[in-house]
Amino acid sequence: MALYLRIFLAFWLVILLTLSAVIFLNRQLQQDQDMAAETSQRVQRFADGMGARAQAVLDRAGPTALARWAQADQQRQRRMQLLIIDEQGSEILEKRVPARVRSGVREWRSGQAPPASWGPWAQEITHPQHGRFLVLLVPPSRPLLVRLVGPLGPWGLLGLAAVISGIACLLLARSVTRPVTELRRVGQALGRGRLHERVGEDLALRGDELGDLGRDFNQMAARLERLVGGHRQLLRDVSHELRSPLTRLQMALALAGRAETADDRQRHLLRIEQEIQRLDELIDQILDFSRIRDQSKLARQPIDLVALLGELVESIRLEADARSVQIDLRAPAPFSVPAHREWLWRALENVLRNAVRHSPSGGKIEIKLEKVGGTSEISIMDQGPGVADDQLEAIFEPFVRLSAERSESGAGGGVGLAIAKAAAEHHGGSIRAENRPHGGLLVRLTLPA
């Protein structure tokens, strides 16, 4: 339910409840007034001669007969209560004396006359032998709601309306402020570094704008946790990847320092040069990956994919020939896509170099370009060992280790495929991998045409 609709319904609920309460209270007040008038008339009729009748029964047969008389009259007076109280303050039929007449009974027991406000409803009878008795007619009590609000008049109605509207507004305020409080709590937890905190299901499952905000907040928190976790993992991986060539450099330097001949020293210096080159390439890849992830938008221009793939194949053919790997490009007539040439080149180059690196000697790599609906698909297929099915998505993460655990001994990778994934996503496309039925890996890069 939309928040506007919730507030709208709460507003009208307050109005309806208030009107209903006022109407109900007015009816109760009117019924109470009519009943009080009717009761007063009946009491007046019954009170006339009540004392004389009770006195006659007491004089004739004593308190026992007086109790029977009171009980018989009580059955006739259904809406009124007839009490006969002795000098000890006890009702002769052991009835409970209402609280509203107890103070008057205490005054009568102390020797005073019944309160004047009781009028003919209370009469005293006496007997030389049996003592004093108070014959009392007690009308039915007024309804609780009438007793509470009725005497207040218009102010009572106003107070009732204030109570009803206050309760409704309290419920509405809690419905709005509780989600805000929950969001504040989770926001403070995220600020303190507890990135696993999420808003509760009570908020996330709401069907209004606050529920949408809660779900978006959870998605943001999950994304933030993944980003921070990814940065931490990237830092650990970069540290590990840089440590390996640095360790080899230190070993080569130590060996060069202990070399006994010029040839041995030259061989170790050549090894040092190779390690420095690998280290330089690794740092370039890390910087490229960081740069493309930080870019929010790429400047695009029409790029001829067929020509771009042709140039790419020629630039890598020397490396492929050195490994006796054949590259076969199948593409239709030239067509263009809006893209950033440098990053698209790097994405395709990294995928193709990865295929050459893992292809067996004498193997073949197939590159196929085709249009599928409103997209352009570039498929690069090799004949290598492939990848475990549960690692097909992980290979596009930086420095992924294709082992059971990401440990120091795990097989380390670079960031080439991670750069390819980032470039594809920045172009509004996607990249995925799958194992070929007869062996090898298929990497498919999809770009919007």
Image (cartoon, rainbow, N blue to C red):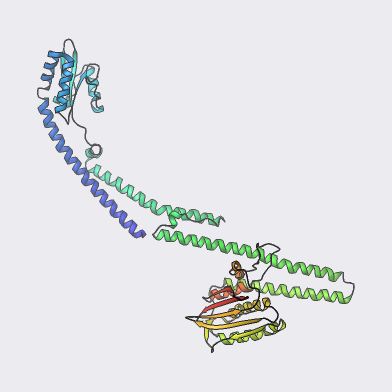
Question: Is residue 285 in view from this perspective?
Answer: yes
The image shows residue 6, relative to residue 352, as above or below, that is above
Report the residue at 76% width, 66% height from top. Answer: 247
- Is residue 263 rendered to the left or right of residue 46? right
Question: Is residue 123 in view from this perspective?
Answer: no
Q: What percent of the width, then of the height, locates residue 169?
A: 34, 50
Query: Residue farthest to the bottom?
Result: 333
Query: Residue farthest to the right?
Result: 260
Quarter of the figure with residue 70? top left
12 or 215, nearer to the observer: 215
Q: What percent of the width, then of the height, locates residue 79?
A: 17, 31
43 or 151, nearer to the observer: 43
Report the residue at 61% width, 64% height from top. Answer: 231
Q: What percent of the width, then of the height, locates residue 428?
A: 51, 75
The image shows residue 27, relative to residue 405, as above or below, that is above
The image shows residue 301, relative to residue 64, as above or below, that is below
Quadrant placement of the N terminus: bottom left
Report the residue at 25% width, 42% height from top. Answer: 156
207 or 360, nearer to the observer: 360
Q: What percent of the width, then of the height, locates residue 108?
A: 21, 19
- Is residue 361 rendered to the left or right of residue 158? right
Query: Residue farthest to the front?
Result: 438
Quarter of the figure with residue 157? top left
